[in-house]
Image (cartoon, helix red, strand yellow):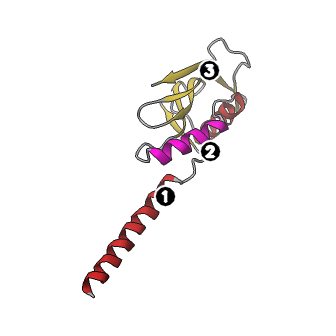
């Protein structure tokens, strides 16, 4: 009788761990963008810069499925959208895109200027280059 109770307890613990694993793995990749700011931007400037990045196509929604798949098979390397900002609060250089854990990332590089309360960046910027790290 006692052995049956132990087996039930072990089975329930294993099922609980399996449910926790699936919950962690299937946690959705959100549209939230992590900003690494080395330019000293204000909160409003960061929000507008994220909006500028979305408009330039830096955060590809189709990448979300790849990040989700990666999270499922390698849950220790949660990915997401990132933006690395360098420069001054008036003029910045930005690398924006996604990271899929410690081993790879991709996106675009662009520059922008803060003019009249918004970021202005040329549509076709020669510096608008793709980058890929792996």
Q: Are marks 3 and 1 in contact (CB under 8 Å)?
A: no
For the residues carrying marks 2 and 1, which lies nearer the camera in this image?
A: 1
- Asked if the residue at tag 1 contacts the one at tag 2, i.e. Cβ–Cβ closer than 8 Å, the answer is no
Query: Residue 22 has which mark?
Result: 1
Q: At 68% from the left edge and 32% from the top edge, which residue is drawn?
A: 52
Q: Earlier in the sequence, mark 3 or mark 1?
A: 1
Of pointers 2 and 1, the one earlier in the residue sequence:
1
- Quarter the C terminus occupies: top left
Q: Point out residue 12 in the picture as x, y percentages from the top left corner.
A: 39, 73
Q: Position of residue 15 (x, y in %)?
A: 42, 68
Q: What stretch is highlighted in magenta?
A: 61-73
What residue would you read off at disc 2? 31
Mark 2 vs mark 3, CA separation in Å: 22 Å
Q: In this view, does 131 lie above or below 63?
A: above
Nearest the viewer among 84 and 105 is 105
Distance from disc 2 to disc 1, alpha carbons, whole Å, reads: 21 Å
**Which residue is more in the foreground, 120 or 97?**
97
Residue ranking furthest to the bottom = 1
Residue marked by disc 3: 111
Q: Is mark 2 on a helix, strand or loop?
A: loop
């Amino acid at each position: 009788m006692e052995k049956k109770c132990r087996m039930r307890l072990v089975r329930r613990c294993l099922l609980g761990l399996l449910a926790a694993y699936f919950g962690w793995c299937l946690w959705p990749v959100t549209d939230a963008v992590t900003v690494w700011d080395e330019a000293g931007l204000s909160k409003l400037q960061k929000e507008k810069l994220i909006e500028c990045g979305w408009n330039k196509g830096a955060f590809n929604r189709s990448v979300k499925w790849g990040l989700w798949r990666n999270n499922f098979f390698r849950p220790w390397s949660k990915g997401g959208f990132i933006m690395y900002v360098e420069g001054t609060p008036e003029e910045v250089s930005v690398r924006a895109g996604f990271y899929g854990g410690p081993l790879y990332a991709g996106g675009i590089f662009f520059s922008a200027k803060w003019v009249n309360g918004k970021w202005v960046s040329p549509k076709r910027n020669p510096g608008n280059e793709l980058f890929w790290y792996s």
